[in-house]
Image (cartoon, rainbow, N blue to C red):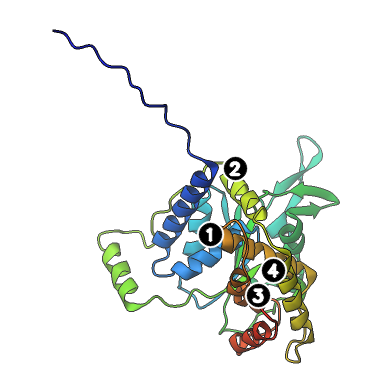
Amino acid sequence: MVETPSQSTSAPSSPPSEATTCAAAIAGLRGALNRALRGKSQVIEQVLACLLARGHLLLEDLPGLGKTTLAKAVAAAVGGRFARVQCTPDLLPGDITGFAVFNQKTREFEFQPGPVFADVLLADEINRTTPRTQSALLEAMAERQVTVDNTRHTLSPTFFVIATQNPVEHHGTYPLPEAQLDRFAMKLSVGYPDRADELEMLAASIGDIALEPRRETVLREGQLAQLQQEVASVAVHANVRGYLVDLARATRTHPKVSLGLSPRGLLIWQRVAQAWAFLQQRPFVTPDDVRAMAYPVLCVRLGISADAGNLIEQILESVAVPV
């Protein structure tokens, strides 16, 4: 007796849902960045929130703690182009945005794009270049475009700036003006890893001649923009919006704050709260999401540093949390 293959009665497998695809993409990003920067899962979550909120990131920390490694890992993970600018006093605006060069053959000026035409731009030690050159990034960070010789050039829609500055060495630096700081969504500090993570880092480096970990590409083309659109669609209840506005007004009336939160900063705070809720796989923002993002958002734009934690806590405690 010959057995004939039985026909399958199971239904064809359906394609993964959009929510599943987004969750898998976030998990891939989270894993790739945590492998690149060991023992800094909380920092990685905040970086992801900044990226998904279409913000820009200021890292204030000592040299050698992984700021460049993190920037390269972000660029690789999202499948984007990476560019680095070493900010020095002699750096010119055209060195960042690009400039026009006269072509002898065509007898016309041709635009040579600068490093700002990347998906992820690392501005290393941004406070070591002059205010004139710092201002070259203002239009790029706010509008994702640059204007050179009265001609507008569009940047990547997912253009992401990671700028670094050293909190210790102040010799030869130019403090970032308020207009520049307000373009950043967050200010973070990587900090030293703990002992177990440093031991693991040393063990992993044995037999490997490269000092930096191998970078991984996680997202396909256009997927980052899709995730950012999902974040923008996270619901924010009217009570939570009112909570945000009351917190912003509290910063403007606090006696120890010289420059309160701007409307741009308020919009950024809402967007990173949406991103934080999205990372927690929630379709709506809670007051806890707002509070979780308070320190990195406010620290960069209120002109505070030493007692920033206490001051921000005072601002949060001065406004009733909506139920």
Nearer to me, 230 or 211: 230
**Residue 212 at x, y = what percent?**
40, 61
| Mark 3 or mark 2, earlier in chain | 3
Q: Residue at x 63, y 65 (%)?
A: 273
| Mark 1 or mark 4, earlier in chain | 4
Q: Amino acid at mark 3?
A: Asn
Q: Amino acid at mark 2?
A: Gly
| Mark 1 or mark 3, earlier in chain | 3
| Mark 4 or mark 2, earlier in chain | 2
Q: CA distance from mark 1 to mark 3?
A: 31 Å
- Secondary structure found at label 3: helix
User: Which numbered marker is on residue 127?
Assistant: 3
**Taking 30 as reference, is 314 above or below it?**
below
**Taking 223 as reference, is 90 above or below it?**
below
Q: CA distance from mark 3 to mark 2?
A: 33 Å
- Secondary structure found at label 1: helix
**Residue 220 at x, y = what percent?**
52, 42
Q: Residue at x 68, y 84 (%)?
A: 315
- Note whether residue 99 is visible: yes
Quadrant for the C terminus in the image:
bottom right
User: Which numbered marker is on residue 240?
Assistant: 4
Q: Hey, which residue is sitting farthest left in the picture?
A: 1
Q: Amino acid at mark 4?
A: Val
Residue matched to label 1: 279
Q: Amino acid at mark 1?
A: Leu
Nearer to me, 291 or 222: 291
**Taking 189 as reference, is 284 above or below it?**
above
**Residue 41 at x, y = what percent?**
44, 67
